[in-house]
Image: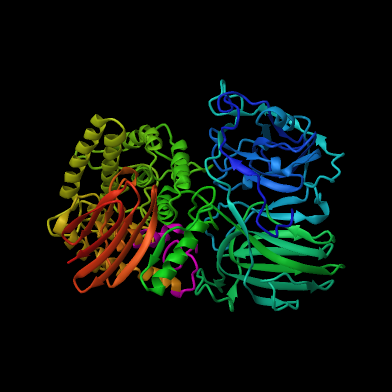
Amino acid sequence: MRLLLCLLSLGSLLPGAGAESDLLTRPWSARWIYPSDAPPFDYGVYHFRRTFELASQPASFLVHVSGDNRYQLFVNGERVVWGPARGDLSHWRYETVDIAAHLHAGRNVLAAVVWNFGTEAPMAQASYRTGFMLHGDSGAARVVDTNRQWKCTRNGAYRPLPFFSPMGYYYVAGPGDAVDGARYPWGWEQPGFDDSKWQPAVEDYEAAPRGAEDAPSMWMLVPRPIPLMEERPQRLSRVRQASGATIPGAFPQEPADIRIPAHAQARIVLDQNWLTTAYPELIVSGGRGATVNLHYAESLWLKGKREKGNRDEVEGKTFFGNPDIFLPDGGAHRLFRPLWWRAYRYVELAIETKDDPLTLEDFRGVYTGYPFERRARFDAGSQELSRILDVGWRTARLCAHETYMDTPYYEQLQYVGDTRVQALVSLYMTGDGRLMRNAIELLNDWHTGEGLTFSCAPSNHPQYIPPFSLWWIGMLHDYWMYQDDASFVKQKLPAVRAVLSYFTSHQKAGRSLGRIPWWNFVDWVEQWNNAVPPGAEEGASALLDLQLLMAYDWAADLEGGLGLPALAQEYRKSAGELRNSIRELYGRPGELFADTPRRTVFSQHTNALAILADVVEGDAARQLVARTLSDPTLAQASIYFRHYLHSAINKAGEGDRYLDLLDPWRAMLARGLTTWSERPEPSRSDCHAWGASPNFELFRTVLGIDSAAPGFRRVLIRPYLGRLRQASGAIPHPRGEIAVSLERQGDELNAQVSLPSGTEGEFQWHATVTPLHSGMNRLHLR
């Protein structure tokens, strides 16, 4: 627990290959270690230290580090790396960092904290047993290899605080921390700390990479494929409620001493003004025997209701939130910071003192998330659209850490359905495809023998959502189209074949799918049973058939471009047969497509996918869009599935309708939401990045920017300005940037398009198609 006043000074995080040619093929000299009193699978927090001498400061000192469940590594008191990036036992991540800048001649100390959440671990956390590993890359660095020369101890100050949502909502994001300051070994990471009573570590398996002969370790180590998470200071904005203490006007935007007398109670509710994901940091002095209860909430709840109302309002509401507890020991400037970050807009501090008064010196946050950099630009002269983009970007960032996440507050799970939308947002907003690549890899790692992926990965709970395996194929196809990384995509073709083999085995003679086991989630629709569309339980669902059809088309593209042409031909044949079957079973000329062959129930979902899957095209598709949007009796797409509805409108050539379809986002803004909610009110989660689809669609539909070839090697610009008279913006591209400026005057359009070097394409405006070359293109179209 150390004071973080500025951005952390980190060792350089490096690719995992290191200096040794055999690092990824042979067992290492380091061992996994653990304390002798560490129950292998139970909850516990442990500290490790290694003291060593250096004749001089080295030019380089490369180490590879990992832990189970999690670790933080300090060098001479400075935190330099933390992890590991989440994976599974067969693909256990390690971090590689050069710590030379933190070393000096003479005595040096490496110190680490490792914790195991035990049975309270987040569902996204895999684990074998408590353990820590550090391997010096070569030469002098081998002196710090983990072995019996490391000392360790259990930190008895910690106990877990399980959180059970008082509203009964599903929660699997891990426990809170209760920390007893009187039992905490303050300064354990500092060079001058006395560790003479600590015990030698117990050696376990040799550390070994995945692929080493005989796999000598349960942790099959692979290099971390993503950068370290961003961390930066973040002040809360204001006090919303307070009792039992006098609050200085500058707090919490600035530190201030808030004195709580002996034998007193105080309550302070702080507002960040927007939702965040951050490590909260509490600093207190004195207060021996006091209790500081901390609770974190996305929003406050209407009393006696399962609703939140306007998110800006706090009066007359109830505060429910996941907890931490800190018990001060009476020392000066004690810093409490939980082991894992928290998601919150509101924080409640409830303080009760005993004989010793307590001084609250500061409460602040350290924002954390995947280090995305916003590179896309959009300007249409509309404050509303700019605000929608800003809120969507915040939502996307809070749901992106070591993996994409459905909700940072409740689950922190990387579901395929959510992730496909999130990844498109990331690509358009940042051009950084590493987290998307990591998601594809993780989900591929969690394939089962029968062919399906887990619904989410990593996960210690084997849940299957079969349609999500089809969306995984779509996500791989997206990556192929927008990122220049064909070799990676090619490696995943066997998994694509496995998924389709599973579904092929469930197709009936007429090519339509029979009943598919497990949870066939499609969308949160009020009329449907647990988000499962009509007909799915009986084996006659248009929506499942349509998703399979799209997957056949994606797979045919992938095999034709990177794999087996004969298999591509087979997939196209299967797609053609299924397409005809869908038309016969669910469609009638000039009418809506039905959800089942009985033609008694209809949805926006089925008709949107009928367009996306080319079951209906041309003028018929445009007419189908009009019917789909105008018929209120159809099951309506929720925030999530509107991405597919809007994509269908674009594909049908009706993209000018898009800006008039943003009312659900306008409604969320009116309710004071600072991120997009999971579903229409009443919503469990206030932050679900599947709702950030406008951060993709405003660029892809309004500005019209899309990939027309794998690797984004060709560009299609097909704008739909709707009611706008002008719009401009840019998105990142593998070779640079695509910039578009549009101005409409009556029926005429003036356009400027700048394409990266070596990139060509076409501009489509109504029926006119104009070639585009690399560099600046100026067009005047009628």
Quadrant the C terminus occupies: bottom left
Q: Residue at image x 80%, y 38%?
A: 105
Check if residue 684 falls in the magenta segment: yes
Task: Find residue 239 and report its horizontal and vertical position in percent.
Answer: 65, 75
Task: Find residue 318 and report its horizontal and vertical position in percent.
Answer: 60, 72
Residue positioned most to the left: 589
Q: Is residue 394 above or below residue 300?
A: above
- Residue 636: in sight, yes or no? no
User: Taken as a whole, is the magenta stretch helix, strand or loop?
Assistant: loop
Q: In this view, does 313 lie above or below 104?
A: below
Q: Residue 599 appears in which quarter of the rendering?
A: bottom left
Task: Find residue 581 and report its horizontal and vertical position in percent.
Answer: 18, 44
| Stretch in magenta | 670-698
- Residue 410: in sight, yes or no? yes
Task: Find residue 631 and report its horizontal and vertical position in percent.
Answer: 23, 67
**Quick check: 354 left or right of 441?**
right
Q: Residue at image x 19%, y 45%?
A: 579
Q: Residue 199 appears in which quarter of the rendering?
A: top right
Query: Looking at this view, is 152 or 653 the one in front?
Result: 653
**Quick check: 406 left or right of 114?**
left
